Image (tube, grey):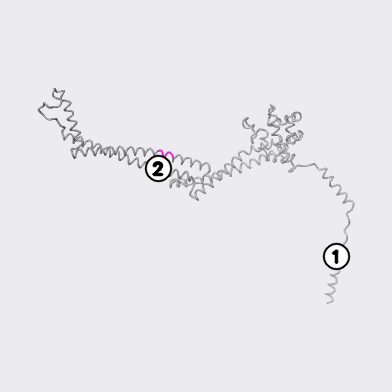
Amino acid sequence: MRHRSLVFAVCVIVGVTSCKRSQSPRKAPDEHADQAAAVQPAVAQALPATRPGAGSFSHLQLLRFIRASRQVVATAEASGRTIEPLPEGFTALAQAARIDPAIKAALAAAHMSADEWADVGEKAWRAWGVAQVDYNAEAPLRQNAADLAAARHRLASAEAAVKSGFPILSEEERTQRITKAQDEATTAMDRATTWSESAQRLRTQIAEAEASAAEAEGGTATGGTATGRAAQQGQDDAQGAAPAAGLPADGASGSGSTPQADPAVTTAAQEQTAQAARVAIASWSQELTVAERNQQDEQEHAQRASLAAEHPDLPRDDVERMDMMRQATLAIEQSKADIQKREEESKLLSAWLQEERRVSAAERQKAAPPADVNLLRRHLAEFNDAWGMTVEGRPKPPEQK
């Protein structure tokens, strides 16, 4: 117990001592701290003002310069000045801006002074020289990226077509299929109309031939109308020949009776007529069958084409479906190979550009701060457009300005 009490007493003493140390009053800040606080703002004011990202002009200043440049260029061209979209051309225009009232007015409308416009413009044009070279040097990389994106799109479309069994069409392809199907439907209906008219003409010819055959066959069987007409025709011929022979026209003084046609000849002629009609009927019937079949085929073709125009995404038949699957499978293989090729080319182009910029880093830094170049690069198209250039830095044709 004595030992335990002794240990407890020692702990209490140590704890009290520690509390006293922690509660000891702090020193008030001395005059040196006051002096340091007073010096700090002065040091901050002495430091040079910097732009975001260590650039020589701000984002806002660049946008204001581009907006003012549009007005200045338009004003200068309206007054007959020739604008040369180069740093030298800007320098000449900046000098004119200090004395030309029209250009001064344009800058005032853009809320920018001639001195500020000249100062920001000089730095921006230096950055433009580097940014434009970089952009043009990246043209193969951009083209390769576009080709890569197109190959990936083709792959996705082909895979979707194989999975769904239906072609995956772009808007242009859809329009082409609709137009083609509508043209097919119109052409098929025109052909069906032509075959219908031909079939109707053949039906008329067959009906007339059947009537002729029936009349001839009826005369042969009954000695009726056809035979009577033949006999009458023979009698008329005989009466016409009597005056020529010096005989009485009415045959009253003749000793013989009126000549009549030979029934055998008449019957043979009627059979020949009926036989010719039957041959014609057989031939025209075959042609009618072909015409009716072709008319039906063309009508069905027109119906299928009209349905295809209404639903261009659907295969029109099994043949087209099989052909689509074959093409989609081939497109998958080609797209995969193309993607691999483009990806390898992209790596090589990127490495080449990085190496070129590493080698020319000192010259680039000397030409313009990297922050200025990066900022101008973001607005290169707007900058060039304000000065009448394409995004590649070439002067625009007069009709595009």
Quarter that holds the N terminus: bottom right
Q: CA distance from mark 2 to mark 1?
A: 108 Å
Q: Which residue is mark 2?
A: 299
Depth order, front residue of 269/366: 269
Q: Nearer the viewer, residue 289 or 84?
A: 289
Q: Nearer the viewer, residue 285 or 318?
A: 285
Report if residue 333 is visible in the image.
no
Q: Secondary structure at mark 1?
A: helix
The boundaries of the magenta stretch are: 186-190
- Mark 2 and mark 1 residues within 8 Å of each other at the beta carbon: no
**Does the magenta-highlighted stretch encompass residue 276?**
no
Identity of the residue drawn at 40% across and 42% down: 299
Reading the image, the residue beneath label 1 is 19
Residue 25, picture quadrant: bottom right
| x and y percentages locating residue 303 in the rendered image | 42, 44
The quarter holding residue 77 reads: top right
